[in-house]
Image (cartoon, rainbow, N blue to C red):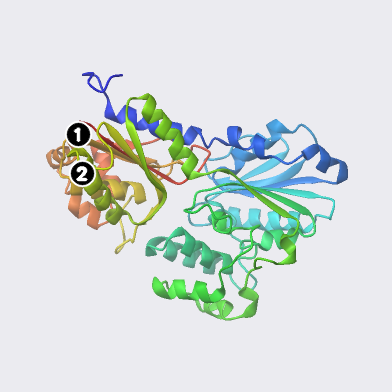
């Protein structure tokens, strides 16, 4: 469709870019090429598959479709993200706040790791969301302790790296402890990255990765974000047992790690799609962090510059970015996630600027804990909101962006995508 065609649909163009980004991280495409030689492993011992994350069930199916031999195992995924497997058990649990189903699954996965011998292989399938899904408290902590800290961190505005530092030091399975349980078995971890920097120690809190952070780091994060901490947690973090296995630890000598999909690759796929549509793409970065509303204002300024002909690219263009922006929730909070908060703040910053259309979605199909992936805005967003009786500034102040976009019919609802390479933002700037 030509950009000058009267039937040109900016929302459709943005959706095509999002779909291209998600498709590039499909486990069915990215997992098989990274599998170890399973036939050689099967000659020596057992192949046991474990995993956690929103993409873990789809990753498990990709393994089964690639290997017809003997294997068994268990992966835990978010409710709604399960896919049928024949040899690998799939368990669903809650995300982002863990529940009893995730607790039980994490305990069973740890038991599987501890049952392995030196000739066995543990194939570990990890993706974003695994931190909440692998929720097994360290000895001396209760499940309620972990739920309380996790919920408070989610409301605090802490980055994913900060949150996972704390989570690792309160866990019996994260922060390299799953690898320690499996030693001396061979461990191969296949990861789909949803974190800025693609650090295996941060993805799902690194259950099979060495952890360079310390309990002192965890305590400092809790203090920085004023997170209320149960007495049991305070006592645990003051002791030596809370420390995680570090780089150089012998337990990692038999561990191999491979990242099979990255946010940057998804942005590049969207950029190629943009070129095919006659747009000039500019990737702003795959690791953008910060308060959603602050990032939105910066991006609004850049979009205005491009529209005025003074930006780094000429319209028609699309500015692409990934990463994970955060939301600091005030009071009781409203409904929404970081992508809708970003979009509402951007709409307010743009004030109906002509020719600028924006989509922000989470590539897993779930913005925060709602049923939408994200939403879209355009030059008419604020005018339509005013006609509908919505006060955008007040709703943003109450972290209630979902209500705003639901009322306008501008939510993007995809359902679970069965992958997760973090947030996707596309700013379409037309002449």
Tell me what residue is drawn at x 61 percent, y 41 percent: 57
Viewer-closest of 3 and 29: 3
If you read the primary sequence from the N terminus, does the residue marked by circle 1 or circle 2 appear first? 2
**Residue located at (19% from left, 54% from top):** 394
- Which mark, residue 258? none
In the rendered image, which quarter is residue 399 located in?
A: bottom left
Q: Residue furthest right?
A: 44
When the figure is inspected, residue 401 is found, relative to residue 81, above or below; the finding is: below
Instruction: Please tell me which residue lies in front, 116 or 427.
Output: 427
Tell me if I can see residue 380 in this picture.
Answer: yes
- Residue 221, compared with residue 349, is above or below; it is below
Q: What mark, if any, has residue 355 been given in the picture?
A: 1
The image quarter containing residue 114 is bottom right
Q: Position of residue 357 (x, y in %)?
A: 25, 36
Q: Is residue 50 left or right of residue 410?
A: right
Quarter of the image that includes the C terminus: top left
Residue 58 on image: x %, y %: 60, 37
Q: Picture coordinates of residue 117 (x, y %)?
A: 83, 55
Residue bearing mark 2: 305
**Which quadrant would the N terminus be assigned to in this image?**
top left
As drawn, is 194 to the left or to the right of 354? right
Q: Is residue 369 visible?
A: no
Residue ID at (60%, 56%): 134
Circle 1 packing at 10 Å, graded few (<14), some (14-19), many (20+), is: some
């Amino acid at each position: 469709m030509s950009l000058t065609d009267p039937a040109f649909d900016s929302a459709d163009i943005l959706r095509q870019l999002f779909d291209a980004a998600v498709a590039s991280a499909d486990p069915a495409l990215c997992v098989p090429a990274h599998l170890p030689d399973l036939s050689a492993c099967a000659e020596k011992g057992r192949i046991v598959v474990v995993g956690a994350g929103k993409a873990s069930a789809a990753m498990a199916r990709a393994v089964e479709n690639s290997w017809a031999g003997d294997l068994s195992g268990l992966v835990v995924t978010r409710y709604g993200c399960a896919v049928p497997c024949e040899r690998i058990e799939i368990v669903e649990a809650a995300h982002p706040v863990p529940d009893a189903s995730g607790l039980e699954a994490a305990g069973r996965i740890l038991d599987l790791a501890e049952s392995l011998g030196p000739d066995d292989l543990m194939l570990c399938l990890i993706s974003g969301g695994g931190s909440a899904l692998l929720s097994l408290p360290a000895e001396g902590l209760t499940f309620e302790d972990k739920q309380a800290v996790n919920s408070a961190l989610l409301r605090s505005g802490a980055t994913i790296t900060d949150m996972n530092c704390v989570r690792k030091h309160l866990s019996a399975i994260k922060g390299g402890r799953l690898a320690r349980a499996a030693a001396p078995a061979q461990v191969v971890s296949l990861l789909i990255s949803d974190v800025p920097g693609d650090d295996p120690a941060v993805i799902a809190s690194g259950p099979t990765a060495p952890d360079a952070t310390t309990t002192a780091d965890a305590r400092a994060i809790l203090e920085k974000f004023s997170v209320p901490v149960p007495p049991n947690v305070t006592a645990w973090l003051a002791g030596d047992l809370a420390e995680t296995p570090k780089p150089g630890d012998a337990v990692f000598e038999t561990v191999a790690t491979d990242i099979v999909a990255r946010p940057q690759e998804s942005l590049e796929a969207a950029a190629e799609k943009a070129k095919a549509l006659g747009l000039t793409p500019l990737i702003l970065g795959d690791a953008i962090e910060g308060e959603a509303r602050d990032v939105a204002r910066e991006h609004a300024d850049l979009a205005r510059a491009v529209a005025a002909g003074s930006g780094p690219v000429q319209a028609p263009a699309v500015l692409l970015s990934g990463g994970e922006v955060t939301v600091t929730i005030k009071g009781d909070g409203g409904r929404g996630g970081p992508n809708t908060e970003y979009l509402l703040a951007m709409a307010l910053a743009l004030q109906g600027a002509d020719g600028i259309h924006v989509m922000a979605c989470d590539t897993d199909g779930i913005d925060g804990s709602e049923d939408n992936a994200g939403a879209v805005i355009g030059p008419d967003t604020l005018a339509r909101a005013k006609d509908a009786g919505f006060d955008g500034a007040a709703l943003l102040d109450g972290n209630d962006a979902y209500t705003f976009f639901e009322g306008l019919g501008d939510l993007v609802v995809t359902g679970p995508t069965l992958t997760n390479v973090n947030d996707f933002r596309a700013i379409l700037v037309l002449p």
